Image (cartoon, coloured by chain):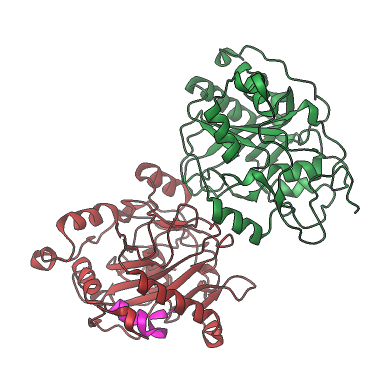
Chain colours: A green, B red
Amino acid sequence: METRSDDFYPTRLERPSEAFGRLDPVIHSTGTDRSQGPLSETELAQYDRDGFLVFNNFLDPETVRRFREDLRAYENDHSVLRSEGTITEPGKQEIRSIFGIHELSERFDQLTRDPKILAIVHQLLGSDAYIHQSRINFKPGFHGKGFDWHSDFETWHAEDGMPRMRAVSFSIALTDNTPFNGPLMLVPGSHKTFVPCVGRTPEDNYQSSLKKQELGVPNDRDLGRIVDQQGIKAPTGPAGSLIIFECNTLHASNANMSPWPRSNLFFVYNSVENQLDQPFCGNKPRPDFLGNRSATKALQPVNTGDLQKTG
Amino acid sequence: METRSDDFYPTRLERPSEAFGRLDPVIHSTGTDRSQGPLSETELAQYDRDGFLVFNNFLDPETVRRFREDLRAYENDHSVLRSEGTITEPGKQEIRSIFGIHELSERFDQLTRDPKILAIVHQLLGSDAYIHQSRINFKPGFHGKGFDWHSDFETWHAEDGMPRMRAVSFSIALTDNTPFNGPLMLVPGSHKTFVPCVGRTPEDNYQSSLKKQELGVPNDRDLGRIVDQQGIKAPTGPAGSLIIFECNTLHASNANMSPWPRSNLFFVYNSVENQLDQPFCGNKPRPDFLGNRSATKALQPVNTGDLQKTG
């Protein structure tokens, strides 16, 4: 495989290559676009330094309850269970993730167009944005498996053709995050370094990688050095908490060893100025539910002041 | 398989059976044996209630360092690597556990006969005691796997013929325990309930169960109820910390998601009045390195005030 001249973050290589500093800003807005909020300079500085921000009680309990009811309804909906975007636990009808949830759920769609959220996204990405991927995750008590350390950008670049680091993820907890139900773990500051990964990507890699990621995982030496220097944070908090994290922030989660399920809403904004190209790994693009190529116009805000009254 | 009339804790059953309250005291000493220390009444009450106690900085850093050096030496010692008591990671030379370590290491043997430790053991078990099992555990960075929830007594009763709950485990950390390197997790108060487990025990079950325990694991319903009511604690602390836990306390550990290895010394005292019988699961006894039947005389204290000067 030849490296393309427009590939600023070569990965899935034949042999190991040194990690290097990111080539893109972390916060893309400037001037009044940056200074007029909604995030304060302190919050922006923290996001710039750590690669993530945490807001407890972002969604009110009633809205959380309605999203959880939706999730339960999906578990009994055969058309949802059979859809390609629904990933079940190996050999079971138990849902692990439903992708493309913003197209399935009016409530979720409205949430992604919440004016305050879009204003934050605009401030971070320095432009309008659209949804690159959305999903609802479900990690059942005792049996939910973990995910190894990875950068989402590494996969989105290699397998979806996302050119630059100009995307941001929102994760909203629908259950309390405790230290024991496999919460999201992040490495503060890791978003500043790109770690090229070794290994050619098979076609349709996503069919196995959504259950267990084998490719696009940094080697132990690079990972060990970064984590040892920068540490690990696992924000805990009540249902309704929001974690915003930069697309290149290393993250992982451990198995759920508790009886308490863990579910969350997850959606990724990509800048309209960072539209997907051909995948840099050389394969054909992944399906739309993983890397959206069809609805990439700037999202327009809708008033969701009373999200809980929908549906 | 018929249940023996001397089996007070039937387990490995053909069909599910209700959990029931333990038939043995948690603290076996009475009168002055109990009141003269070394544990205070407050500590005893806590052990009685929770099933465990934590002492940070129990071993000094120099002693910890020497034990870690010993561990490194074992990793390069072919006779240790080939011994039946050495469990390596699947397909690797990397040590996961070395059993029978008190017979291999003068330093460890002395530690198990430390006068203060033996006095605590006497206070908890109400008698002299001997080592039922000892081992050193090693959970490497990133690749150390977890262990599901279990009661050690359940296995020792079924597979080793330990008649009653009159044993206590000591776990001493040789590395810092952090929330992210797979620390020991315990369920406070779980030692008060015996949860019979389902499933006939295959002969030589230990050859696979030491890598991944499938039998002797409570069902999700019982486990969920107990953990949900009583919670989970994962003591963290610096290298040298000691956790004492009752033989029936439910415990587990998650995978090591950090670059920081986790190793500890682990040794179990059984009361000399609670000698092993034929295994209650009906199989032949496990090897001595797992359930010692040959050196079961009361341990005599040795002065280890300067453990670090040995060897």
User: Where does the image place residue A193, in percent across and percent down from the top left?
Assistant: 67, 48
**Residue at far front of view:** A31
The residue nearer to you, when weighing B4 against A229, is A229
Q: Is residue B293 visible?
A: no
The residue nearer to you, when weighing B59 against B41, is B59
Vertical side of A79 occupied by A248: above or below: below
Query: Residue B101 colored magenta?
Result: yes
User: Where does the image place residue B113, in percent across and percent down from the top left?
Assistant: 27, 79
**Residue at far right of view:** A2
Quarter residue B38 falls in: bottom left
Q: Residue at x 58, y 30 (%)?
A: A44
* Left or right of B15 in this view: B55: left
Query: Residue B110 colored magenta?
Result: yes
* Left or right of A295 in this view: B63: left
Q: Residue at x 68, y 21 (%)?
A: A109
> Magenta span: helix, strand or loop, mainly?
helix
Quarter residue B207 falls in: bottom right
* Image quarter in which the C terminus of chain A is found: top right
**Residue at far left of view:** B32
The residue nearer to you, when weighing A69 against B81, is B81
Region rendered in magenta: B99-113
* Left or right of B182 in this view: B58: left
Quarter residue B114 falls in: bottom left
User: Where does the image place residue A140, in percent across and percent down from the top left?
Assistant: 55, 42
Q: Is residue A67 visible?
A: yes
* Image quarter in which the N terminus of chain A is found: bottom right
The residue nearer to you, when weighing A311 against A286, is A286
Q: Residue at x 63, y 50 (%)?
A: A149
